[in-house]
Image: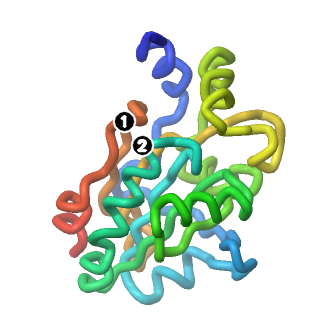
Amino acid sequence: MMNANKIFKSVTQAKGLKVGETVTDFSAKDIFEKTYTLSNLTQNGNVVVIFIRGQWCPFCNKHLKELQEQFHKIYEKGASVVVVTPEKSEFIKKTIEKTGAEFTILYDENYKIAKAFDVLFLPNKITRLMYNTLGAKLKESHSDNSEQLPIPATFIISKEMKVTWRHFDPDYKKRSKMADILANLA
């Protein structure tokens, strides 16, 4: 079994946007080629932005299934949900099949959203080999061959495009909880 500390050392360069920081507007497409911008999404209220690694990740799939079971509670608070992944549409479709996700999942082409949120990192070579063995196909499923990944973080973004809450933990097993998201939606 791989030492978790070795995996986490490679993610230390990413720090994630802090509470109070302004988010750079972004645009990305869903599986239907519909373009979404953060500025348009925030016009209707807070936006919960969740980064996932991909359809191959059992922790991502479990997290999205839990989110799917209760995401209506986020909408009841006047907010919306956007999931961001570096995987192309055909792989996002697999995520939807595995999780039953009914919320928007966006393809982060060239990692521009992950970079803007400061969640992008390069896993070490052994970790990338392990992920690809699990079916990640990082070079095939992403827009380039760099095999970078986002830290699976969650951010609440206000109408003013500011981070009002975040869950940022380099340990990919630790994910945001619905109770925490709901408690932090004003």
Q: In x, y percent, where is residue 108? A: 67, 58
Q: Which residue sits at x=65%, y=37%?
A: 135
- 76 with respect to 149 (left or right): left
Type of amino acid at the residue the image marks with label 2: Phe
Mark 1 lies on a secondary structure that is loop
Q: Which residue sits at x=46%, y=68%?
A: 100
Q: CA distance from mark 1 to mark 2?
A: 6 Å
Indicate whether 68 appears above or below 139: below
Q: Quadrant of residue 36?
A: bottom right
- 44 with respect to 10 (left or right): left
Q: Which residue sits at x=69%, y=72%?
A: 31
Q: Are marks 1 and 2 in contact (CB under 8 Å)?
A: yes
- Classed neighbour count for the residue bearing mark 2: other residues with Cα under 10 Å, few (<14), some (14–19), many (≥20): some
55 or 103, nearer to the observer: 55
Indicate whether 76 appears above or below 12: below
**Quadrant location, the C terminus:** bottom left
- Classed neighbour count for the residue bearing mark 1: other residues with Cα under 10 Å, few (<14), some (14–19), many (≥20): few
Q: In x, y percent, where is residue 68? A: 36, 68
Q: In x, y percent, where is residue 122? A: 64, 29
| Front of the two marks 1 and 2 | 2
Q: Which residue sits at x=68%, y=69%?
A: 28
Q: Which residue is mark 2?
A: 59
50 or 137, nearer to the observer: 137
- 96 with respect to 179 (left or right): right
Q: Which residue is mark 1?
A: 173
How many marks can you see?
A: 2
